């Protein structure tokens, strides 16, 4: 089922890290250098520079650096899929590396992965780091006066397909690079196998540069997972890089680990659930981060001071460090141990065994997974004064309320069984609640939908986005949601007043609540209604997909039985996209027709509106960075030419119209007309409506009703 792959794509964001070094360490630092497998002592600041806001950058960079006295070398780290993966997915590892005394510059940019094969792709970043970064950190970020960026001692590397950026750089100029670090390296320029046309490594041929190199791989990299893909196929990774190097090269295989295990914990847990990149849940992940840090720190320190720190190379040739078993290899390529080695360009050498290998999979869906987290939501304009009518007349624009975002995490509260992200207006009023369940049955983190959730909340609603890492089957049980509802109805308002400083006249109107979700999150909402109406006034389904498993043959649980009506009556708005059921280049539809669309519409017993945005796709309601990622990969079919900002406005307007009409069906009955029109905000739709016996413009409450077959 395609819902899965959406979710999977998130997990698969694989990127890696580099190292931090204590340059010119004082005598009292020697104890830490002896054990490079623990976090360093430097306090770390994170500064984000965005291409769109800078005159000097062609990429985005995230800088993790020690705000301390010292001359700190630079590590350029290119994220996965050729630098497309946002750096924020790797905060834990970046921070730990930087804590050892390095200016870690994580480089990424939304765009075609082919662009990063051009060495010029990184040129503006290097110029910015060498000429402007230090002043920027002093002047804008308040770094101490004796902090200095030692760009003359730089390292370059990346994770997964981000490594081809590093290799491409070294193929044209050594610049100030002292060493190369490859983690789970994968070669190739395109996620679609038949479109792969560019490589940086030719098997049987040496590269045209000599530089100390550390290559770290995982034992599960080349293993084909349950979806028929290997995240780092052996013919495009592993020894492909090791055999091509000219300088001293260390090869470290962490045999029990997988391609995604170096990510931040939330992504590791997501991948363990999905097993998109094969993974052993029993292999300890914090220790793996320590291990990676230690290996990289050892490599960098030894390269920078091969005489004084030569013993640190031993850490790259041992198994069992920090309890991590490895297979180790080393090729000196003519290097005398414990002697300095500089980067130099050398002629390429050819072998009679040169050949072209057909690309099988690359880690396409890794990167893709980020893109496809699809979720949706609704909003309501609560009882308003006459002077607010101008906004109500046009529900397709952002509201006027200032919005706060508050995150409540299950692990940090005694009262929640789920995580919730609350987007709410810090203003005077009684604001109704919208419970929004994220994709894949509530597994997708809510932060992927900040733009839409905020825009909806700006119309005057307490948007409660609900998600929790765990089996998607658990969310079929209505009890999965009980603690969330109890928290919202009994504790949320006090919490926002006392901990978040909301004004005294802000109130949570939980007696007027709505529930819905996106994609596989929709089954949570339906399951709630099957047992209790509670205070719900209406149901909103966005790209709804039924089923409990990402693997079609494993689906054993549904909330809708085709040919049978549900056992509740409630006003319902269902929004789908025309590209939902279209099979993409990977053989999957993100919302197969038999599990979505009319399956839900035909089962409802209350007044139900059906809105098909014919030109849009399953992932087009996400935040812009994810929409762009999906447009590049086309995992969920999407038309890049259709305007996405207008689509967010359209969704907001449709949902606001529905909620207002439901809450005040007499005075605001005309709002229902918006659910039956095409061309609003320039969005063409196919619309359907069934009254199921409801008299238009009359009040309707949720009631439980006996389920029955449509055809006896």
Image (cartoon, grey):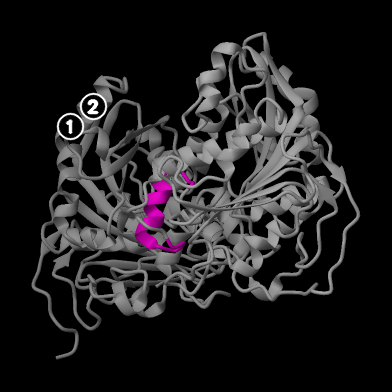
Q: Residue at x 49, y 71 (%)?
A: 224
Would you say 174 lies left or right of 583 here? right
Residue 472 appears in which quarter of the rendering? bottom left
Q: Using the rendered image of the protein, determine whether residue 697 is visible from the camera's viewpoint.
A: no
x then y, percent, for residue 617: 52, 65
Q: Using the rendered image of the protein, determine whether residue 177 is visible from the camera's viewpoint.
A: yes
Does residue 275 belong to the magenta stretch? yes
Q: Secondary structure at mark 2?
A: helix
Q: Secondary structure at mark 1?
A: helix
Specify the quadrant that holds the N terminus. Answer: bottom left
Nearer to the camera, 290 or 104: 290
Q: Residue at x 49, y 68 (%)?
A: 223
Would you say 262 lies left or right of 558 here? right
Would you say 487 lies left or right of 622 here? left
Would you say 20 lies left or right of 148 here? left
Which residue extends farthest front? 336
x then y, percent, for residue 143: 62, 14
x then y, percent, for residue 188: 70, 63
Q: Say the numbered circle drawn on residue 491.
A: 1
x then y, percent, for residue 270: 38, 54
Does residue 389 belong to the magenta stretch? no
> Which region is colored magenta?
262-278
Q: Residue at x 34, y 63 (%)?
A: 520
Which residue extends farthest bottom? 712
């Amino acid at each position: 089922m395609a819902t899965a792959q959406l979710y999977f794509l998130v997990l698969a964001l694989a990127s890696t890290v580099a190292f931090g070094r204590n340059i010119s360490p004082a005598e009292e630092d020697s104890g830490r250098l002896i054990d490079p497998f623990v976090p360093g002592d430097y306090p770390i600041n994170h500064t984000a520079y965005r291409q769109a806001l800078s005159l000097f950058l062609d990429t985005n960079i995230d800088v993790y650096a020690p705000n301390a006295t010292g001359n700190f070398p630079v590590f350029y780290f290119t994220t996965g899929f050729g630098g497309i993966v946002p750096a924020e997915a790797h905060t834990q590892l970046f921070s730990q590396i930087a804590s050892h005394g390095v200016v870690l510059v994580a480089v990424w940019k939304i765009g075609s992965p082919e662009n990063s094969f051009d060495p010029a792709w990184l040129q503006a970043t290097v110029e910015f780091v060498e000429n402007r970064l230090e002043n920027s950190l002093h002047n804008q970020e308040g770094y101490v006066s004796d902090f200095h960026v030692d760009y003359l001692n730089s390292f370059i590397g990346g994770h997964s397909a981000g490594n081809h950026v590093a290799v491409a750089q070294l193929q044209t100029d050594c610049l100030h690079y002292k060493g190369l670090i490859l983690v789970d390296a994968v070669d190739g320029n395109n996620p679609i196998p038949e479109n792969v046309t560019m490589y940086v490594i030719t098997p049987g041929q040496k590269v045209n540069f000599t530089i100390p190199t550390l290559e770290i791989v995982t034992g599960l990299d080349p293993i084909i997972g349950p979806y028929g893909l290997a995240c780092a196929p052996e013919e495009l990774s592993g020894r492909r890089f090791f055999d091509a190097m000219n300088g001293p090269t260390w090869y470290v295989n962490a045999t029990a680990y997988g391609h995604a295990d170096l990510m931040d914990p939330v992504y590791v847990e997501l991948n363990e659930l999905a097993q998109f990149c094969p993974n052993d849940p029993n292999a300890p992940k914090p220790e793996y981060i320590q291990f990676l840090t230690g290996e990289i720190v050892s490599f960098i320190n030894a390269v920078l001071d091969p005489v004084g720190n030569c013993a640190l190379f031993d850490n790259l040739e041992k198994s069992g460090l920090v309890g991590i078993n490895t297979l180790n290899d080393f090729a000196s390529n003519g290097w005398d141990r414990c002697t300095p080695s500089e980067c130099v360009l050398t002629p390429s050498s050819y072998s009679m065994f040169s050949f072209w290998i057909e690309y099988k999979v690359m880690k396409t869906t890794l990167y893709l997974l980020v893109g496809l987290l699809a979720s949706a939501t609704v909003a309501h304009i609560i009882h308003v004064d006459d002077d607010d009518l101008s906004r109500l007349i046009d529900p397709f624009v952002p509201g006027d309320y200032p919005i706060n975002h508050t995150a409540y995490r299950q692990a940090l509260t005694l009262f929640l069984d789920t995580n919730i992200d609350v987007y709410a207006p810090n203003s005077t009023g009684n604001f109704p609640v919208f419970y929004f369940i994220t994709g894949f049955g509530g597994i997708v983190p809510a932060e992927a939908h900040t733009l839409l959730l905020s825009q909806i909340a700006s119309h005057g609603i307490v948007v409660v986005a609900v998600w929790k890492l765990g089996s998607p089957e658990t969310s079929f049980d209505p009890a999965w949601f009980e603690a969330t509802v109890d928290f919202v109805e009994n504790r949320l308002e006090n919490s926002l007043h006392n901990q978040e400083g909301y004004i005294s006249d802000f109130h949570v109107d939980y007696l007027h609540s709505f529930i819905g979700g996106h994609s596989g999150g929709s089954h949570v909402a339906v399951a709630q209604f099957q047992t209790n109406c509670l205070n719900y006034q209406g149901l909103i389904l966005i790209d709804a997909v039924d089923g409990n498993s990402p693997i079609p043959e494993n689906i054993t649980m549904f909330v809708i039985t085709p040919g049978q009506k549900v056992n509740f009556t409630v006003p319902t708005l269902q929004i789908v996209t025309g590209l939902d059921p279209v099979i993409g280049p990977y053989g999957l539809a993100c919302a197969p027709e038999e599990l979505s669309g009319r399956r839900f519409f035909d089962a409802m017993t209350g007044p139900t509106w059906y809105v098909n945005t014919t030109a849009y796709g399953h992932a087009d309601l996400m935040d812009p960075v994810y929409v762009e990622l999906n447009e590049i990969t086309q995992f969920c079919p999407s038309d890049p030419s259709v305007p996405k900002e207008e689509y967010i406005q359209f969704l907001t307007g449709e949902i606001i119209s529905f909620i207002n009409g439901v809450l005040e069906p007499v005075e605001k009955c005309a709002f229902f007309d918006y659910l039956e029109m095409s061309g609003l905000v320039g969005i063409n739709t196919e619309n359907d409506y069934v009254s199921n016996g409801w008299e238009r413009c009359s009040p309707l409450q949720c009631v439980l009703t006996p389920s029955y077959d449509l055809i006896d």
